Each structure stands twice: as structure tokens, then as C-alpha cells.
Amino acid sequence: MSEKSSTANHLAARSLIVISEFADYARQLCVRVLASSQPIVRIMAVQHDTKEWILAVARYMNLSFSELALNSGLAASTVTRYMNDKSGKLSVTERTLEAIAVYSGIPKNVFPGQRRLPGFGESETVPYDDKQDERLPDWVLAAIAAHKGNRNGIEPWLMKSWALDQLGILPGDVLMIDQNRRPKAGDIVVAQLTDLVSQRTETVMRRFDPPFITTHSSKMGPGRPETVDDDRVIIMGVECGVIRPRH
């Protein structure tokens, strides 16, 4: 065999190896995507989507726009004027959408009946920041300060969902979270959920039922237990007190 022929055969063999490796990588990537049991939901980006969401929530709750607004603590006209506007000039505030989401238990960027992909929606709980969040009543701030005392690693978190309403934890509650306490069965915990495909993270409030964290909600219905693996699901702290800033 000539040197030229040998070189050609070597290049051909090398090309086949590269093609095979690329095909195998593509197959693995496809399997990872298909293995995800959670559908990617459409995020509201324009006014049309916002109106679709409010309409879907009203139908899901079997309420008129006026009833949905009033039950959410809003003036009836706040929702009805916006939904009936054909000019496209009226808008709706984030506060209005948040109020509807809190009342209905349906995240404001997810349509009823669709599962939320962790990281695509807003976190269900956030640390309370008196410089950025709406100021709480003075007695609540005093209770937070008294509970913290001189202890490190204890911070207030705001609950924003109905994920634990059957355990008495409601949207708007302030939970004192101890970042140094080890969780035990039955504890309420703050956890981070990471989607392995998108690498986006969501912070949630759950009950710890080893080795899972679970929801307990009559409004949101059954939720899938998540296994605490300190990789995709990480417990960040344990509840050590609840303050309800309602009059």
C-alpha cells in the first residue's frame, strides 16, 4: 500500500471516529431533554398574555372579573376596566397581578393546569428587606428584632405562596429561618430547587419529610415530593418562628 493511500485511509478512519463521537453526544443531549418530566411553560411577556392569564385564572376559579378583583382585595374596576379595554392603552400593575396570584394560588406567569418549571417563576419565598420590600408594621419589626436577639444566622423570610396553607402558613406570613439548625422530620424549611436542564434556581418553603421536602396545600393541590440530595435540592434553613402581620 502506498504512503498516499495509507494517509487517506487514516484520515477516513479519523473522520468516522469524530462523527461517531458527535452522534453519541447528540444522543445523550436528546435523552437528557426528553427525560425531563416537566413541560416548559410560556412566560407572559406582553399585554395580550397578561389578559389571557387573568381570563384563565377567572375561569379556573369560576369567578367573574369583578369577583376575582374583590376577592383579591382590589377594586372591581381595577380588573374589569383593563380586561374590557380594546384600545390597548390601559395597563395593569405588578401589584394587581401579585394580588390575584396570592389569592388564587396560581403564579402570575403560569397558566392554570400547567406545572411550573423551577426557576422560570418567581421564588415562593424571599428574605425580608426593609429597604426594598413594603414596610411591615412597627410591632412586626419589633417582634423580628426580639426573635433574632444576638443570635447569628436567623433571618426573616416572606412567604409568597399557598404551598403550606394546610400547615397554617399563609402568603404574607413572616417566617424566622435559622440557617444553623439541622432539619428534622416535620420541620418547615427553606430550600433551593435547581432545574438540571436550565440550571435555574427557585427558592421554596416546604415541610421536611425525610428524605423529601413536600407541599401541603388545599389551594395548589398535591405537589411532587422532591428528594433532598444537597445538589439539585438543598435545604438552606429551618423555621423557628412565625409572625403574621395582619390586623
Image (cartoon, rainbow, N blue to C red):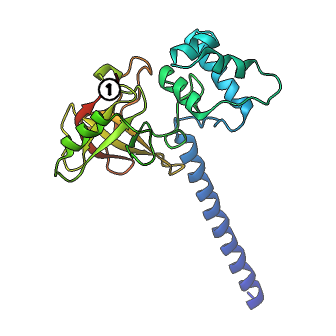
Secondary element under disc 1, as helix, strand or loop, is loop
For the C terminus, which image quadrant? top left
Instruction: Give the farthest residue toward the right.
Output: 87
Tell me if residue 229 comes above or below residue 105 in the rendering.
below
- Residue 133 percent across, percent down from the top left: 44, 42
Residue of label 1: 169
Residue found at the far front of this picture? 138
Query: In front: 145, or 192?
Result: 145
Residue 94 at x, y percent in the picture: 59, 34
**Relative to 224, 190 lies left or right:** left
* Residue 5 in picture, x, y percent from top left: 76, 84
Looking at the image, which is closer to me, 27 or 15? 27
Q: Residue at x 69, y 25 (%)?
A: 51
Relative to 85, 160 lies left or right = left
Report whether residue 101 is seen: yes
**Rendered image quadrant of residue 42:** top right
Q: In the image, 191: left or right of 144?
A: right
Q: Residue at x 32, y 34 (%)?
A: 174
Q: Quadrant of residue 163?
A: top left
Q: Amino acid at mark 1?
A: Ile
26, 37: nearer the viewer: 37
Residue 212, visible in the rendered structure: no
Total label count? 1
Q: Residue at x 63, y 9 (%)?
A: 64
How packed mark 1 is, by other alpha carbons closer than 10 Å (few <14, some 14-19, many 20 or more), is: many
The image shows residue 213, relative to residue 85, as above or below, that is below
The x, y position of residue 148, in whole percent, is 20, 45
Rendered view: 144 above or below 26: above
Q: Quadrant of residue 146?
A: top left
Quarter holding the N terminus is bottom right
Q: Residue at x 23, y 44 (%)?
A: 145
